[in-house]
Image (tube, rainbow, N blue to C red):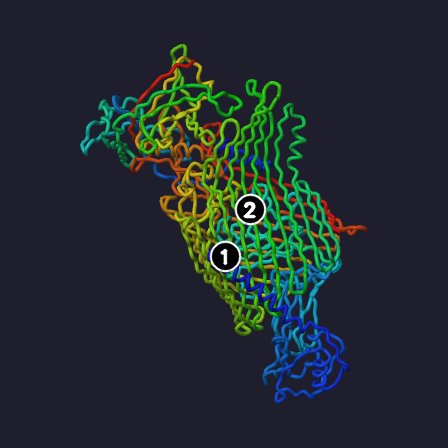
Amino acid sequence: MNKKTIHILLAMMLAFSACTDEVSVDIPEQAPLLVINSFFTADSLWQAELSSTVSTASKPGKKLIENARLVLWQNNQPVDTMIEISTGNYVSDIQPVPGKTYLITAQAEGFPSVRATGTLPEMAVDFTILSLEPAEDLPTFSDENYELQLKIESTAQEQVFFNLSMYVLQENDSMVRVDSAFLANESLIDDQDEGRGITFSASELSEEGQLEVLIQKKYLAGKQLIVFLKTISPGYYQYEVSLHEHLNTIGTPFSQPVAVYSNVVDGYGIFAGYMIAADTISID
Amino acid sequence: MRGYKILLICLCIQIFLTGYSWCQDDVLQKQVTVNQTQGPLSLFLQQLKTQNGINFSYSESTIQVEQPVSISQTTNSLQNMLQEMLNGTGIRYLVQNQVIILSKSAPGKASLYVINGYVRDSASRENLIGATIMEVNTGRGTITNNYGFFSLTLPAGDVRLVTSYVGHKSRQSSFHLHHDTTMYIAPSVPLMAEIEVTSSREKEDWESSQTGAFSMPMDELNALPALLGENDFTRTIQLLPGVHGGTEISSGLYVRGGGPDQNLVLMDGVPVYNAFHLLGFYSIFNDDAINSIRLLKSGFPARYGGRLSSVLDISIKEGNQQQWHGEGSLGLLTTKVLLEGPVNKNKTSVLVSARRSYLDFYTSLLLLASPDDTRLGYYFYDVNFKINHRFSDKDRIYFSTYVGKDKAFVEGGIDDEGTQVLTDLGILWGNRIASFRWNHLFSDNLFSNVTLSYSKYQFETTGNFLFGDQQNDFQNNQDIQYFSGIRDISIRTDWDYYIQPWYLLRFGGYATFHHFTAGALRTSGIFENEQNGNPPIESLESAVYLENDFEINSKLQMNAGLHFASFLVNQTRYFSLQPRLAVRWQLTKPLSVKASYARMAQNVHLLTNIGVGLPTDLWVPATDRVRPQLSDQWSLGLYQTLPAGFNLSLEGFYKRMQHLIEFKDGASYLDFEDEWQDLVTTGKGWSRGVELLLKRQSGKFTGWAGYTYSITDRQFAQLNQGKRFPYTFDRRHDIGLAINYKKSKKFDVGITWTYGTGNAISLPSQSYFTQGENPQEVFLYQERNQHRMRSYHRMDIGLNWHKQKKLFLRTWSLGFYNVYNRQNPFFIFPAINEDGQRIFNEFSLFPIIPSVSYKIKF
């Protein structure tokens, strides 16, 4: 019974006929702005996607920007100019260093210049998988839940933020993403993983640093469950949480729209670092 | 606790004074006998002393005891005999310690006498609230209070009293006033053939100092179009200038830029927290049970407090004192019945009414064809009960109660891989209200009332699960319940003191103990047993008030008062001193100009995601972190009575609101794991506008036409980058039209039409996509509520055919909601069409909805 379900129930209670019509809306044209999407981590090449905003009066779609100049900076010094490897995709062979703060600037013809600052966390918070067992919880009526127990080396008092994602290694050695899972203590409110992992803060952990995640059994068809735990920056956390709320509030009359967090000055998007740790458990 | 002490003291004073006044009255009520009907005053005084034991005290130098006097009968109460005997003598009396003291009236001054009493319906003997009593010769007048009581002080001499009440024939009484007089005036309801009825509301419109007031007779409401066969006065009130309903489904009230929580809705003096059934489609008030309604939008008298934007005072009928009557109606959605009558004629009467919807019955029929045993549906019901007893002309008690509930439910069974699960999911909400009131008349000019009340509103979503095995042995269960609500226990006392013909003093106070449950989740059963969410909060709200109603001269009238309130919550106490002032200046006889100022404080907040007045909205108190809401409102207007029963008013207003709350972006009432105070942001609001109203409440054509131009803004530090933005329900232009036409005693028709500027809405101007395997479109909103939906307009028509049968009056009603089938916008959302093009879809709710209902009245 999540937020949307209750809204749907409320709407059903109207119990009268309703209709939907296309209407023309007079929305003033606004100048497009650059959008930087770049998540970086240690032991990896820099990668950034540069696109622009598109008016809602025009055809929707991602508008990638080519021939732009993207520069990485550290300590007010340029360290590299990124190379465009495909339309709108830029890379650098500079490897981010944990604990360091970086600046990215982007210039493209016809757009105001943008910049963003992001810090790579010092280290990935370590964790171990304790168990993966059938959940002794409410039946979901269509699927049986499994409960994944993790021990994370952090405490609820720490200002640490995480993003958790899971993959199943199948018999044919292909990897399939588990794209529907939720924290056990959030089970009645929000399905957290909608293809972007489960984003949470250390305050969700028990006093012993444990976390319970519920996974529907149907997603566990394979040999192994591989769990990735990103330790993310506060900006990354804000971005993911607001994006989740933004997607939840579109198309409902019962809430105001939510703006997605951005740390890109004079533009949109996110420039954020993370450190990652992984663990694996066999699926019986 | 200080508030309680003050009230206890008031209560003690009232009880003490009651006893005192009874003692004072004893001697005057004594039956006395004299030997003759004419003779010198001294003879009567002597016989009263020697034969009846009545002691007199007077000075022979000032009292001419040898002057001749006369009486009509030799045996009478002492009071009546004295009044007759001293008529025209220039001698007055008063009682002190059981002794009658005679004194001469001051030379050159006319003797003043009090006329008081109750105005009652001639047939039912029910007290009429807001009836006008006007003395034609002096031009002095008054209106009855919420209990039908009035007191009017006039000089001795010939008086001509005209008593009028909407929907009733005016009653005229002429007599010579020479002593204090108690009257029971009973205007009669005209026969159906007598269509021409008179109005009494001139006092309201141009003669009183009250601004922004509107009263509506229930007869007028019943002739207006019904929605699915159900009249609802809140929908009619939405047609008034300065008032609208927000959205299509709402019968909520948005008054002069205020929110739905800023209306003090009183049912027999008790606040109601959620006044709506069916997501706001209907109000909880069964119109058959309502005696009167009165809406105030500005110039709030000091006796009212606790909300910023309006007062909606609803009085439930008392029950017919003379004979038993009943009403019943059958509509497409609801059935309702009402029964009222005397338990003890002229002493005790009772009223009970009940209403239930049967949408669940329809859904059950539809699901009969379904192969599984799933049941779903929705219903609401409400019950009103009221009993009152008159101990004497001076004491009366009332007990009234209301119970109402809405429930939407889904019930069914599931086979979950061998486990049989029976489910019962529901959403419930409702009010429970009870009040006990005691009216006491201390003297001809001092009226008091004490009210003890209980009011509870609760919202719940429930899930009950029963788990069984293959043999259907259901032994295990798990329940989940999310609930929120508010519970009040209150004591209140109000006093009306008619000190002088030109001066009415009102004073009193109240104390309310609030218990808030601001959202909690409780689980119990075989899997989980715990409770999470916001802990309950308790608070004490108390206030005292003083209200002075002056008629300084024939042109200038003023209502000035102070409302001093205190709110104690979590060791934090808030005080507010709220001055109130309303002034009327009569320019010419039927034309006046009025001005008013009112500061209001509101100690409870409603947490609402978008303000459509859903039952899920949370009532929460002001706390040490979230301050009480405050408003200051100024009004200025012209009021004129026109020929042919028309009244015209033009009123401008400016309202400033502080400490309003809103959810932060993305926060929701369902985030019960977070402290609600962390989810909200506080800010300010402004509303200003002009309202024009032309109305007629007499004749074959009655109704009104209103126009409002207003601008309403909000500003919150954490919303819209801290910039000011239009309120969602900012309605620049608003037109409301309501017309009744009583063609004959057999047929009448009602038409309403409303027009309003579209609601403000946030629409995305641009978008971009996220990075990753599954890119998501992110919308960009430049400013909050910078766009407008299309305008809203709708016409409803209701036709009523009446026929007097042998035993009852029956009425067939045919109604059409949205008669020209306007697709009014409810909300707009972005989408992509089949060609991959961006479009905006507009969602509309109700097309034309016909309805029919059958009603009997006996």
Q: Quadrant of residue B313?
A: bottom right
Q: Specify the subunit that label 2 lies on.
A: B
Q: Specify the subunit that label 1 lies on.
A: B
Mark 1 Cα-neighbour bin, 10 Å: few <14, some 14–19, many ≥20: many
Q: Which residue is mark 2?
A: B456
Mark earlier in primary sequence (1, 2): 1
Q: Nearer the viewer, residue B506 or B752?
A: B506
- Label 1 with label 2: CB-CB less than 8 Å: no
Q: Nearer the viewer, residue B569 or B743?
A: B569
User: Residue B132 placed where, x, y %?
Assistant: 63, 65
User: Residue A56 placed where, x, y %?
Assistant: 41, 35
Q: Nearer the viewer, residue B290 or A54?
A: B290
Same subunit under labels 1 and 2? yes
Q: Nearer the viewer, residue A103 or B744?
A: A103
Q: For the residue marked with disc 2, what is the amino acid?
A: Lys
Q: Residue furthest right?
A: B806
